Image (cartoon, rainbow, N blue to C red):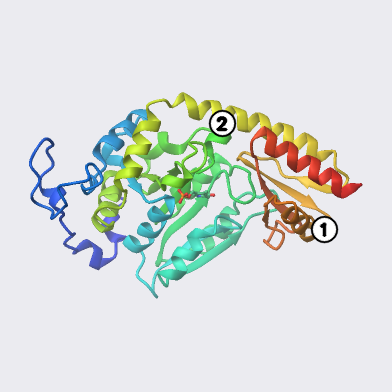
């Protein structure tokens, strides 16, 4: 039987969380003299709802998941950091991940002085199951997977992910930041079968709200409760909660954006393939393309000179020679292609 309490740090289990004024009285339409707020400058004068009740209800509807299984944070990055802090004793515990992948898993582990063990992806950019499991010992608390993966842009095989969830004795954190751009189904539907699964999603990509900083974690009620116990009480501010709620009223907008971005991804890929300087393009399940150049450094600098900024991933293991190019608007993508054509002539 899986027992989450055996994985949690002892000090977190015994922690008495901060109780805010707004935790103690949850009603509306009252005279609030409990939190030393300024009575003027409504509505920015009030502390935000620490549990983000309204916003979570709306997200629960969209995701088909109870509110109790949802954590909201200041970007996915907050959830990544809190997971490490709930489960990993500094200097003792370790976390496991694929390589290459999103850089924040390692940075958060490093900040918390938690050993970060990496298993290189195989030649098809898929998880090496045996290697990942062989890195685990009885101090391995978390395994970070990312699918579709950044920067390799492919999805991991669903069966591999499921196998890792079954075999790994700690929590598997599956980052689905780019899921909307792939044809694959989320593993949210598997949450009830796996008490050791945490799924991360974000408003920063398909939803077009990177600026408001709002990330989601979906997991068992026990795990969500632990995250809520150690988060800053007011981690999602008033403006963010309001902007997200406003925007979620019309979720058709997101689907239209995703379709346009997928259209543009196909167009961009075709145009890039016709350039002699392009060696390869990885198949993408995300809103970016990994493009291999003979001289990536030169192309990168040339584009900066033309005020087009891409990401140089050419020194990343398994990504040697590649630049990571986000799919932009039609006009931006056309400018990129025209600019690269100019370099040729
Ligand atoms: C962009 C990205 C995120 C989003 O992080 P936020 O903090 O929510 O903006 C999460 N995971 C991966 C792999 C990403 O590339």
Horizontally, residue 301 falls left or right of residue 58, namely: right
Please tell me which residue is depicted at 26% across the width and 42% down the height of the picture.
Answer: 52
What residue does disc 2 label? Answer: 258
Quadrant in the rendering for residue 239: top left
Q: Nearer the viewer, residue 43 or 61?
A: 43
Q: Do we see residue 252 in this rendering?
A: yes
> Splitting the image into 4 quarters, where does residue 102 fall?
bottom right
**Identity of the residue furthest to the right in this view:** 345
Residue 194 is left or right of residue 68, and the answer is: right
Residue 219 seen in render = no
Q: Nearer the viewer, residue 123 or 61?
A: 61
Q: Secondary structure at mark 2?
A: helix
Residue drawn at the location 75% of the way across and 51% of the way down = 306
Tell me the tag on residue 168: none
Residue 297: % across, % down: 77, 60
Query: Which mark is on residue 295?
Result: 1
> What residue sits 42% from the left and 58% below the top?
142
């Amino acid at each position: 039987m899986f027992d989450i309490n055996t994985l949690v740090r002892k000090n977190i289990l015994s922690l008495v969380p901060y109780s805010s004024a707004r935790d103690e009285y949850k009603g509306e339409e009252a005279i609030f003299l409990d939190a030393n707020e300024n009575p003027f400058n409504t509505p920015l004068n009030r502390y935000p709802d620490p549990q983000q009740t309204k916003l979570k209800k709306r997200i629960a509807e969209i995701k088909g998941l109870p509110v109790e299984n949802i954590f909201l944070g200041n970007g996915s990055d907050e959830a990544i950091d809190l997971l490490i802090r709930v489960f990993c004793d500094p200097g003792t515990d370790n976390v496991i991940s694929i390589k290459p992948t999103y850089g924040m898993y390692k940075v958060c582990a490093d900040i918390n002085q938690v050993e970060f063990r990496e298993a290189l992806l195989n030649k098809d950019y898929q998880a090496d199951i045996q290697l990942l499991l062989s890195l685990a010992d009885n101090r391995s608390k978390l395994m970070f997977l990312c699918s579709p993966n950044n920067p390799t842009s492919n999805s991991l095989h669903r069966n591999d992910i499921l196998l890792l969830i079954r075999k790994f004795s700690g929590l598997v954190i599956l980052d689905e930041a780019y899921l909307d751009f792939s044809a694959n189904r989320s593993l949210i539907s598997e949450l009830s079968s796996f008490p050791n699964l945490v799924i991360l999603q974000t408003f920063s990509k398909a939803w077009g709200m990177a600026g408001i900083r709002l990330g989601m974690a979906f997991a068992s009620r026990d795990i969500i409760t632990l995250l809520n116990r150690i988060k800053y009480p007011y981690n999602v501010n008033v403006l963010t909660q309001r902007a997200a709620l406003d925007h979620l009223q019309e979720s058709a907008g997101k689907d239209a954006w995703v379709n346009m971005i997928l259209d543009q991804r196909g167009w961009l890929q075709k145009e890039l393939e016709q350039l002699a300087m392009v060696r390869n393009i990885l198949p993408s399940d995300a809103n970016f393309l990994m493009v291999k150049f003979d001289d990536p450094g030169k192309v990168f600098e040339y584009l900066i000179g033309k005020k087009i900024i891409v990401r140089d991933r050419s020194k990343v293991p398994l990504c040697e020679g590649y630049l990571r190019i986000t799919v932009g608007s039609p006009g931006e993508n056309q400018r990129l292609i025209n600019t690269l054509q100019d370099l040729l002539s």
